[in-house]
Amino acid sequence: MSKFKVVHYINQFFGQVGGEEMAHIPAEKRKGPVGPGLAFTKNFGDDAEIVATIVCGDSWFNENLELATETVLAMVKEESPDLFIAGPAFNAGRYGVACGTICDAVQTELGIPVLTGMYVENPGADMFRTKVLIVSTADSAAGMRRAVPAMAKLALKLVKGERIGASVEEGYIPDGVRRNFFDKKRGSTRALEMLLKKIAGEPFETEYPMPTFDRVPPMPAITDMTKATIAIVTSGGIVPKGNPDRIESSSASKYGSYNIEGVDDLTSETYETAHGGHDPVYANEDADRVIPVDVLRQYEKEGKIGKLHDWFYSTVGNGTAVASSKKYAAEIAEKLISYDVDAVVLTST
Amino acid sequence: MKLEVGYIDIKGIRFGDYNAVEDGILIVNPEPLLEPVLEDPLIKSAHFEIATPGESIRITPVKDVIEPRVKVEGGGGVFPGMVSKVDTVGSGKTHVLRGMAVVTAGPIVGFQEGIIDMTGVGADYTPFSKLHNLVLVMEPVEDFKQHEYEAAARLAGLRTAAAIGELARELVPDETVVYETPTIAESFKEEWKDLPRVGYVMMLQSQGLLHDTYVYGVDAKRTLSTLISATEVMDGAIVSGNCVSACDKNTTYHHQNNPVIHDLLAVHGKKINFVGTIITNENVYLDDKIRSSDWTSKMARYLSLDAAIITQEGFGNPDTDLIMNCTKLEKQGIKTVIITDEYAGQDGKSQSLADADELANAVVTGGNANEVVVLPPLDRVIGTLDYVDTVAGGHAGSLRPDGSIEAELQIITGSTNEMGFNRMSAR
């Protein structure tokens, strides 16, 4: 089998052109490995080889971001490589930003796997950690000996299309994608050890850093309900009997839009719940218990509300990812706006 | 309380014409064991099957997993208030058939029953693949209400486990361990005064509608947070009655072998002073959540805790209880670690919990339950594959024509346990 072709990006310092005084040099391409590329070559063994190295001044790249990205991208493209690696940049800020920028561009434009490496506090790490995989390195080039084998190992996994393990296993900076792995100790023991550290005031590492929540301020109240069109949206999984869209009982991959024009009451013959998170008996007996179509229809007849919207929108909230819910909500909201709906009764179970 | 637990190692199960444990082998004569099960008018049929670790067997839909135990000395009997009459347990002597379990299976109660694979990828995710399982397969009568059948199936499992446990009464244990929990006065004794006072806050699933836990026979949603001895839990004072997603439901087996309790007791008097266990519920109403978490923090203060481990059951709605318990303890200066699991989406990119707070800065995770796994076809199915597509974690087409299953880890019993029973984690 032929070796995977790799293009490597390094800065002027690691390209042995010079230090800060040479940071202005534009990108140039050389054949084969240069500087740290030699160590990569050793670690790649028979699996991959560096066919070209792009050496570029840090100042030139950062001061001409667009031009530099275009230039380097074109150089990479000429080689039609299977894999692109950049750095490691350690704690060099401009180098880190260049590595992140060019990796992101290569990944997006050329669709090949990319990998870089840097110190966790490098500004490039914060900017690019969720876009490209960044192996966590020491803060100076003294860490090269450890960085290269870790990067080479992960790079080969990427180019071979193998499953990528969790950040703690592979040594990359957490990229915002949660991945499972088997730890050495069971969870209760890990909890006890974490607690002992916390009690002693020693540093400890949480397995899940808490996210910050996005809070949405409520809309102003409706002043005249008698003219308002009211819609129903639910995560309670109410669907026409038989669940025509086959919405999953948990971790729903879709939502349904169902017409209720002329429907005054939901009955056990016509509607049911697809929700797997609760005893369905009461919802199946009378789906109005989850989405109050009967009462809203009554209000419509009595003139208490202007109109009950002709459609209701339903998904299953049980075990459904927030990102999926956000997506369905955005689509549902667009529909509601296009129908001039004024307010929504949101129900959950 | 002081409890001596004698472990009798079970190395195999076989059918025979009498019931006994001989040389570590459980011999099962089904008829007398099934008789009380079939007395329940909601159970149409019942039979036993045996699943051994490593065998090409898939058990589904799994309801509960129960370890057979028997009270040999001391007050009360196992599963007080459920099988034995209400009487305080947790003292004296208990025998355990270690290395086996009674698993209840058969057509579903709700949507949230699971799979235990005895070999292959799936076996890596469930602790129950490592046990010799006596599977009680039941079928309900045609016309039944889910919650009524759940109660019937739950009792059938507990009764069967108690009957099997009874076979261990006269046996000589392979290993004996003494577990002892202090009174409040004892917890202040001089030799422990430099040790941190640590408590355990055990959250019990009590959302209702098939999400219930029973304490001495009481439905936990009708309780206020209270204290329980670790040894009472070992004697089956807490049993599962719920159909929360299979991956993070605390089965009765998990309660009997609560890993937090065992880990805390192991370092009690050495690294920590394990003062006590608080049980608190996970009700759906906001008032209940506030009241129960207030009560938990009051008890933690009453026990003068320095720190606590908090464990959860289920996900979504109970995430709010978890965060309330955590923040209310932290605000009193009680340091916490919480054990939970994650629903980060199949791509792992979504926010993992339904609630969050920066005070919850020490989290142990049982993994992302949405991660997709492909389970290979296995030779034998105990129960039925009829519900694989519809139980939580499955989707239309989960069960493939060749018998393999593509589903989320949610579907595997005990895979992302939130008592920290497993090694799985996520980053």
Image (spheres, coloured by chain):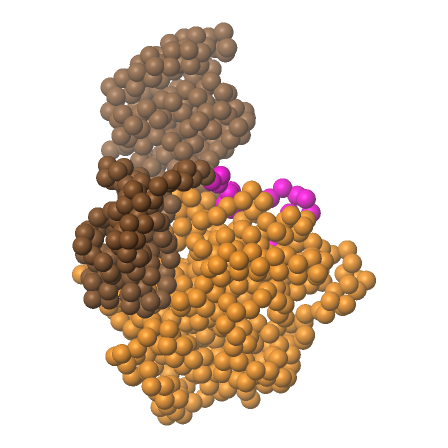
Chain colours: A brown, B orange
Residue A97 x, y percent position in the rendering = 44, 21
Corner quadrant of residue B197: bottom right
User: Taking the image as drawn, is residue B103 in sight?
Assistant: yes
Residue B272 x, y percent position in the rendering = 69, 58
Q: Residue at x 35, y 49 (%)?
A: A346
Q: Residue at x 27, y 78 (%)?
A: B143
Q: Is residue A262 left or right of residue A75?
A: left
Residue A275 x, y percent position in the rendering = 32, 59
Q: Residue at x 41, y 8 (%)?
A: A25
Q: Residue at x 44, y 27 (%)?
A: A127
Quarter occupied by the C terminus of chain A: bottom left
Q: Is residue B44 left or right of residue B366?
A: left
Give A236 or B410, whichever is nearer the viewer.
A236
Give B319 or A215, whichever is nearer the viewer.
A215
Corner quadrant of residue B261: bottom right
Q: Is residue A220 magenta?
A: no
Chief secondary structure of the magenta portion: loop
User: Taking the image as drawn, is residue B399 in sight?
Assistant: no
